[in-house]
Image (spheres, rainbow, N blue to C red):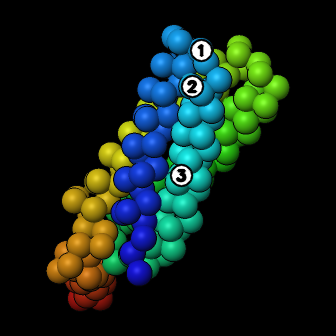
């Protein structure tokens, strides 16, 4: 089952939403706004982690069908996803600590950090789009091994040329 695309879209949108809610909280602090900001950051962290683990599973399925360039991009995408999951978990921990201790300055830091994560998730989404639309990851009749089969046949042709010399 392909879960990564569904979770990834939430993983991109929720940090952006958490940033907007956090900025609104900073501009007009209140107990309710603090709760909503903390909850949105927590949900963003959960969905980034879900997207990472779903991507790990889905990536393993498509890896063998990608070209060399596609495999390289998939590895970068996976590594960045791991960093995002870890960093968003840290941001959520900071936000929850600040929320419970009522440390407004630390909550501001959490909003700045979640904004940074949100920007990075946009880049991560661009990489995922390239994997899908350029390299055909999970696209029927595209990523069914054609790129790697073509590369293998080119390698075989090169070997035959070497043998004939």
Q: Would you name the residue on which mark 3 appears?
A: 48
The residue shown at (20%, 78%) is 140
Instruction: Residue 76 in the image: state x and y as whole percent.
Output: 48, 53
Image quadrant occupied by the C terminus: bottom left
Crowd tier of the residue under label 1, counting other residues whose Cα lies within 10 Å: few below 14, some 14–19, many 20 or above: few
* Residues marked 3 and 2 touching at CB (< 8 Å): no
Element at label 1: loop
Task: For marks 3 and 1, give the CA distance.
Answer: 27 Å
The residue shown at (50%, 34%) is 18
Q: Which one is in front in this view, the residue at disc 3 or the one at disc 2?
A: 2
In the rendered view, does 74 fall on the left or right side of 97?
left
Label of residue 105 in the image:
none
Q: Which callout, 3 or 2, points at the residue further toward the start of the chain? A: 2
Q: Which callout, 3 or 1, points at the residue further toward the start of the chain? A: 1
Q: Residue reaching furthest right?
A: 101
Q: Quadrant of residue 99?
A: top right
Element at label 3: helix
The residue shown at (39%, 75%) is 2
Q: Would you name the residue on which mark 2 appears?
A: 33
Q: Would you name the residue on which mark 1 appears?
A: 29
Crowd tier of the residue under label 2, counting other residues whose Cα lies within 10 Å: few below 14, some 14–19, many 20 or above: some
Q: Does 135 appear above or below 33?
A: below
Q: Residue reaching furthest left?
A: 141
Task: Identify which residue, 33 or 115, lies in the foreground.
Answer: 33
Q: Quadrant of residue 123?
A: top left
Q: Does 123 appear above or below 137?
A: above
Number of marks in picture: 3
The residue shown at (50%, 19%) is 23
Task: For marks 1 and 2, give the CA distance.
Answer: 6 Å
* Residues marked 1 and 2 touching at CB (< 8 Å): yes
Element at label 2: helix
């Amino acid at each position: 089952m392909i879960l990564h695309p569904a979770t990834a879209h939430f993983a991109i949108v929720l940090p952006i939403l958490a940033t907007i809610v956090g900025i609104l909280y900073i501009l007009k602090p209140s107990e309710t706004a603090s709760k909503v900001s903390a909850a949105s950051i927590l949900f963003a962290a959960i969905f980034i982690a879900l997207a990472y683990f779903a991507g790990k599973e889905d990536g393993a399925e498509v890896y063998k069908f990608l070209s060399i360039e596609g495999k390289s991009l998939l590895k970068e995408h996976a590594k960045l996803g791991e960093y995002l999951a870890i960093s968003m978990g840290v941001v959520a921990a900071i936000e929850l600590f600040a929320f419970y201790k009522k440390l407004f300055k630390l909550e501001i830091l959490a909003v700045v950090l979640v904004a940074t994560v949100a920007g990075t998730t946009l880049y991560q989404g661009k990489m995922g789009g390239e994997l899908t639309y350029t390299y055909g990851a999970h696209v029927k009749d595209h990523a069914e091994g054609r790129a790697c089969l073509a590369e293998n046949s080119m390698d075989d042709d090169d070997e035959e040329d070497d043998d004939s010399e």
